[in-house]
Structure formats: structure tokens, C-alpha cells
Amino acid sequence: MVAHAFSTPYTEVSVILGIGIGIVWLRLLYTGVKELCEHAALTFSGYLRRRPDPDFERTLRDAFAELDAELSEVLADR
């Protein structure tokens, strides 16, 4: 067993809870309560990520369309 610096039982639990509360507090500082609740709802409903930036999504779709066109040209020669 590991020797603990504190002999108080469940000390590590309170440290972990303190870290968790600190993380939630920092998230509330940098994002609003509304955004945090929306993110929690998305997380619990199974959608773990937000929608990507529309410009980034359009650029990525265009790149894949170009790749698909090039691949179809290459495969058409075979």
C-alpha cells in the first residue's frame, strides 16, 4: 500500500472533487451557463461534439469532392 501524507480517510476523494469543482468553475468563467448546459445536454444525448465551423465544413467537403473526382478519373482509365 502507498503511504499517504494525510491520515484522514477519504482525503483523495475530496481532492478529486476539488479538482472537478475547479474545472467546472473555470468552464463557467470562460463560457456562459447557457453554453455549458447546452454542451451537457449534447453530451448526455450522445452528440459529443458541436457542429463544425460552416466555412471549414464547406472547404472540407470541396476537398473531398475534388479527391473523389480525381479518383474516378484514375479508376476510369483501368
Image (cartoon, rainbow, N blue to C red):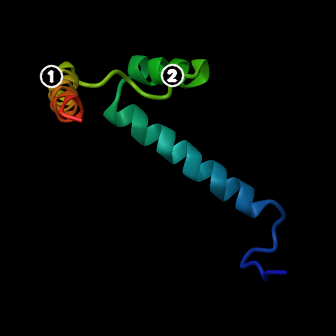
Mark 2: few/some/many CA within 10 Å (<14, 14-19, 20+): few
Tally the numbered discs: 2
Q: Is residue 6 above or below residue 55?
A: below
Q: Residue at x 36, y 24 (%)?
A: 32
In-image side of 37 versus 64 (left or right): right
Where is mark 1, residue-wise? 55
Element at label 1: helix
Task: Quarter of the image for the C terminus: give it.
Answer: top left
Single out the residue that lies furthest toward the front: 78
Q: Nearer the viewer, residue 62 or 28?
A: 62
Q: Position of residue 47 (x, y in %)?
A: 51, 22
Instruction: Please identify the quarter of the rendering in which residue 7 is found.
Output: bottom right
Q: Nearer the viewer, residue 52 or 21?
A: 52
Q: Residue at x 70, y 54 (%)?
A: 14
Return the disc, 2 or 1, that comes first in the chain's sequence: 2
Q: Are marks 2 and 1 in contact (CB under 8 Å)?
A: no
Where is mark 2, residue-wise? 47
Q: Amino acid at mark 2?
A: Tyr
Instruction: Please identify the quarter of the rendering in which residue 10 is found.
Output: bottom right
Element at label 2: loop
Mark 1: few/some/many CA within 10 Å (<14, 14-19, 20+): few
Q: Residue at x 74, y 62 (%)?
A: 11
Task: Quarter of the image for the N terminus: give it.
Answer: bottom right
Q: Nearer the viewer, residue 3 or 63?
A: 63
Q: Residue at x 50, y 38 (%)?
A: 24
In-image side of 2 versus 28 (left or right): right
Q: CA distance from mark 2 to mark 1?
A: 21 Å
Instruction: Please identify the quarter of the rendering in which residue 3 is found.
Output: bottom right
Q: Position of residue 18 (x, y in %)?
A: 60, 51
Q: Is residue 32 above or below residue 10?
A: above
Q: Is residue 17 above or below residue 29?
A: below
In-image side of 78 versus 37 (left or right): left
